[in-house]
Image (tube, rainbow, N blue to C red):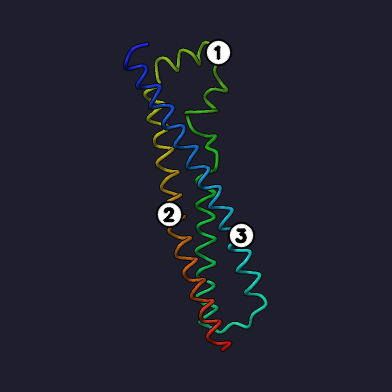
Amino acid sequence: MSALEIGLSAAHAEVKAEIARTDSKASLLLAFVGALLAGAWTVAKDVPLTTPTDVAGGAGMGLLVTAAGLLLRSVRPNLGGSRGFPLWATLTAEEITATLTQDQAADIAGLSRIAVAKFTCLRRAVDLTCAGGALLILAALLAAGSVA
């Protein structure tokens, strides 16, 4: 195996591992956002809220729902792409071997673009989750202030 082939194999494995890491992070964050939404809704439905509390809480919930949408988008399978599962499903065993030996650099580039897109969605979702959480904290403080 040449140095180029070894490098390509290492790069390919690294990109695939990065996609798996991003998907794992997105799954954990999606579970956290879902629990946060459920908890906030459970508390908010039983507490009398003022208009500022409603506005802050509603904005926080909206940001969390948007974050959940971004997370779902980042882990959504791309079955219409030219790389990955749909491509391999249409090839014979010999064609797969030929494609891998000839086009591994293009596969790495395609997978890298997928990884960057997933990472970008994840980063935005984390930012929205932080902002939504801050607004929910503000809403809780406003609710506590109006009760006291």
Q: Disc 3 to disc 1, how far (Cα)?
A: 45 Å
State the residue position of label 3.
35
> For the residue marked with disc 1, what is the amino acid?
Ala
Dot 1 surroundings within 10 Å: few (below 14), some, or many (20 or more)? few
Q: Is there CB contact under 8 Å for labels 3 and 1?
A: no
- Please give the label number shown on residue 33: none
Question: What percent of the width, then of the height, locates residue 62?
Answer: 52, 66
> For the residue marked with disc 3, what is the amino acid?
Ala
Dot 3 surroundings within 10 Å: few (below 14), some, or many (20 or more)? few
Quarter containing the N terminus = top left
Of all residues shown, which one is farthest toward the left?
A: 3
- Against 42, residue 30 (above or below) is above
State the residue position of label 1.
93
User: N-terminal of the two: label 2 or label 3?
Assistant: 3
Regarding mark 1 in the picture, which secondary structure is present there? helix
User: N-terminal of the two: label 3 or label 1?
Assistant: 3
> For the residue marked with disc 2, what is the amino acid?
Arg
Residue under the image location 59 percent in, 82 percent down = 49
State the residue position of label 2.
124
Q: Which of marks 2 and 3 is in front?
A: 3
Residue under the image location 45 percent in, 43 percent down = 118
Residue under the image location 34 percent in, 21 percent down = 7
